[in-house]
Image (spheres, helix red, strand yellow):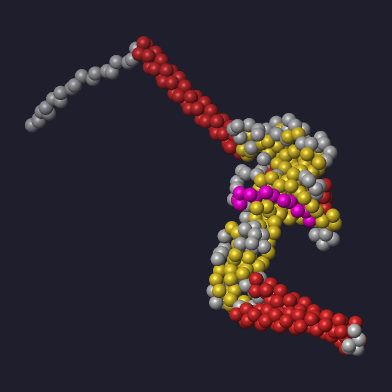
Amino acid sequence: MTTEQPEQEITPKTETPKPGRGTTWLIVVLLVVLAVGIGAVVRTGILSRSASAAALARETRENAALTVAVVHPKNGGSEEEVVLPGNTQAFTDSPIYARTTGYLKKWYVDIGTQVKAGELLAEIDAPELDHQLQQARADLETARANLTLSQSTAERWQFLLKTQSVSRQETDEKTGDLNAKKAMVEASSSAVRRLEDLQSYEKVTAPFDGVITARNTDVGALIGAGSNTPGKELFHLAATHQLRVFVNVPEVYDRAARNGARATLQLSEFPGRNFTGTLVRNANAIDPVSRTLLVEVEVDNAGGELLPGAYVLVHLKLPGRESHGLTVPVSTLLFRAEGLRVAVVREGRAQLAPVTIGRDYGNEVEIISGLNPRDEVIANPADSLTSGEPVRVAAGGAR
């Protein structure tokens, strides 16, 4: 028996059509355009990164340069000034002591009181002295009575001597007794005057115009005249209408110590204000220990603004030769092992220029050589500054 296989259905094969020549060129063009775009993007990124790197390098170089302030040297002046410390003192300064012994009865002035010469400051109660004065006056009256009797007796005996009624010896005795009585009267009068003077010292008065700067006693205090030991100071009186300022001038500046020269005074409590004084005298001798010359400057203080004991800065002018150098602030100097240097800006870099200084003006110094007026000198240079280091001048330029 033959079994018939079912016939399989045969599906016809469909062929994929091959692309034509036009489609191929289109794909090639698209690939080329894409490649060009990618190249342009890559080139732009590279250029941008290169510019950023250059800007960063430039900014780094600029930030690496030290920013400095500069000053220009100034021409030196024809007059030199020296500034020295001084102390003000009252024109007259005196302690007030008692001249009699007793108890303080009353005081009339206290610290800060302005007094006139002869004004009553205090009273002392001295009853013992009063009694001594009364006794001395009584002794004086007795001596005067004895003198009167002796004088009449001597005159009577002189008359009797003319008539030979008495001897010359007895007459001389009466005359001698008269002279003795006169001496006793003089002695008693002197004792009375001394005690009267002591009694007048019971009233303590001001010896000159001034201000009371201290009161060291109170009512009831025992006052000693200090015959054997120094007594206790009752008051302290200072004349402040005019002040003395004593200044120790170094030997090198003794040219400033010219009597009659003007001096300018500055005090910290009066910023920006100057007081004028006159140099009135000097010691005319150099102190061998300090090598200074002591000078005295008098300052008018009628307004009482200045106080004794204050610290002042005294400016004295030194007449001298004309300076042909330049002056720079002291803060521009650099003290190096190789010598004194000044930092100057040249072509964007710091150069340490050696200089020679002349006179010292305090805040400024005279430069004899090493600088010219057009140099830009770095103000307050850092100690670590080296020659050739790049620097940049701060906004505002030189001062």
Percent across and percent down for residue 255 are 83, 47
As drawn, 283 above or below 67:
below
Q: Residue furthest top?
A: 22
Asked if residue 51 shows in the view, the reply is: yes
In the rendered image, which quarter contains the C terminus? top right
At horizontal 52% and vertical 30% (from top left) the residue drawn is 52
Can residue 300 be found in the magenta stretch?
A: yes
Quarter of the image for residue 105 reads bottom right
At horizontal 58% and vertical 76% (from top left) the residue drawn is 125
At horizontal 60% and vertical 65% (from top left) the residue drawn is 120
Q: Which residues are magenta?
A: 294-305
Give whichever of 14, 68 is nearer the camera: 68
Quarter of the image for residue 28 reads top left
Count of marks placed on residues: 0
**On the rendered structure, is 36 left or right of 219?**
left
As drawn, 21 above or below 260:
above
**On the rendered structure, is 377 left or right of 354?**
left
Percent across and percent down for residue 164 are 91, 86
Can residue 342 be found in the magenta stretch?
A: no
Give whichever of 105, 272 is nearer the camera: 105
